[in-house]
Image (cartoon, helix red, strand yellow):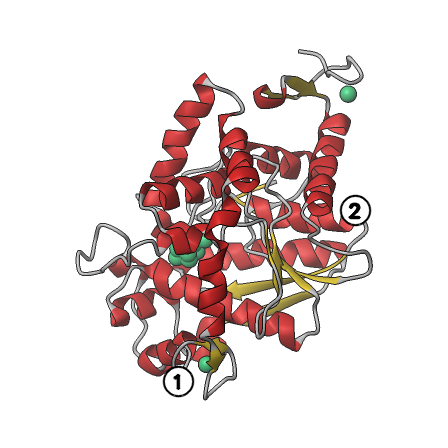
Amino acid sequence: MKCTVCRGPAVIDLRRHNANFCPDHFLKFCRDQVARAIDEHHMIEPGERVLVAVSGGKDSLALWDLLLELGYDAEGMTIGLGIGDYSAASTEAAVGFAERRGLELRLIDLRDDFDYDVPTASAVTRRVPCSSCGLSKRHLIDTAALDGGYDVVATGHNLDDETAVLLGNVLHWHTEYLGRQQPVLGERTGFPRKVKPLVRLAERETAAYCVLRGIDYIVDECPMAEGNRHLRYKEALNAIEADSPGAKQAFYFGFLARAADRFSPEVDAAQQALRPCARCGSPTTGEVCAFCRLVDQVAGEDPVPVELVRPGRAGVLSERPGGRESERGPSGPLRSSKSGKRRR
Ligand code: Q46
Ligand code: ZN
Ligand code: ZN
């Protein structure tokens, strides 16, 4: 297998691009795809300060590295979710990446800073863990970005994530989510701009990028993601992609080009109904925002072990319609079955 560009030995084939690349040209391909996404969707202007939401997985660390490679002023933020060994290893990977490169990483720990963790919140609220997890992450990252004076928040959602979310939202016609499914969510009152610079890269590519760049990332998926719909949609799309390379890209970018605008008015309507939370000032539709209500409900409760709230175990947790499709779970071709294992 030869590199399509230089005819040297190739290390990866990209069927949807009908191309093979050697290490150097693959890394250049990744940088070019991210630069193109940023440019085409007006994600980040030169000189803007970027806060990267870092989980310690391949996507967020590749994103941080790529933004720095492209010359952006990018700092990281990671949130300790308290999901047993998984969270400990995730934070370790994020901290290790930042320390080795001398980068600024903001750290928040749900247990230390707010006296709860995701498993406990799940047990107390009797909802799937991703419900309180997603809510907490969104609120804390938005708040950190606004308080820290960042211009934009960047997240590691890749092409596989976005197509899986799109499939879920289309299957259930969650039009309010379709209206928000853009690679850029513009700044609104109380919300920073949010961008997804990896939308042109598949997760196999971000994993390969990390391996070639020597980035030590957590390989395991969150144990709470087991069996969730998001992963099942990914599997279905992988089967389609295997028969029809490029199908995911056509699905997602076709949606952006031809359909996404049709769902936007609902977002505007929802935005108009927002007002500041009486406690923390964050935008909310009620008196007190969902994050402050969650903290009220769960802070100080006795910690619940991860094993008791793993999907399929408790049998008492409800899943809100559409709630999971707006979140993502890390996965990839290089994943390991060992808990907390990281790939170098
Ligand atoms: S970390 Fe949190 Fe994800 Fe785990 S509990 Fe769900 S939302 S799956 S990205
Ligand atoms: Zn080459
Ligand atoms: Zn609040």
Depth check: give the residue in front, 303 or 321. Answer: 321
Amino acid identity at mark 2: Leu
Say if 87 sits above or below 299 in the image. Answer: above
Vertical order, 23 against 252 (above or below) = above
- Give residue 70's mark: 2
Q: Quadrant of residue 111?
A: bottom left
Q: Residue at x 58, y 54 (%)?
A: 155
Can residue 228 be seen in this snapshot? no
Going 54% across and 31% down the picture, which residue do you hit?
A: 249
Q: Where is residue 50 shown, x and y percent of the image?
A: 70, 61
Left or right for 225, reference 12: left
**Which of the two residues, 133 or 313, is positioned nearer the viewer here?**
133
Find residue 203 and report its horizontal and vertical position in percent: 54, 37
Question: Which quadrant holds the N terminus?
Answer: top right
Judge whether residue 60 can be spotted in this image.
Answer: yes
Q: Number of labelled discs?
A: 2
| N-term mark: 2 or 1 | 2
**Which residue type carries mark 1?**
Glu
Please state the horizontal and vertical placement of residue 198, each as a whole percent of the image. 62, 43
The tag on residue 287 is: 1
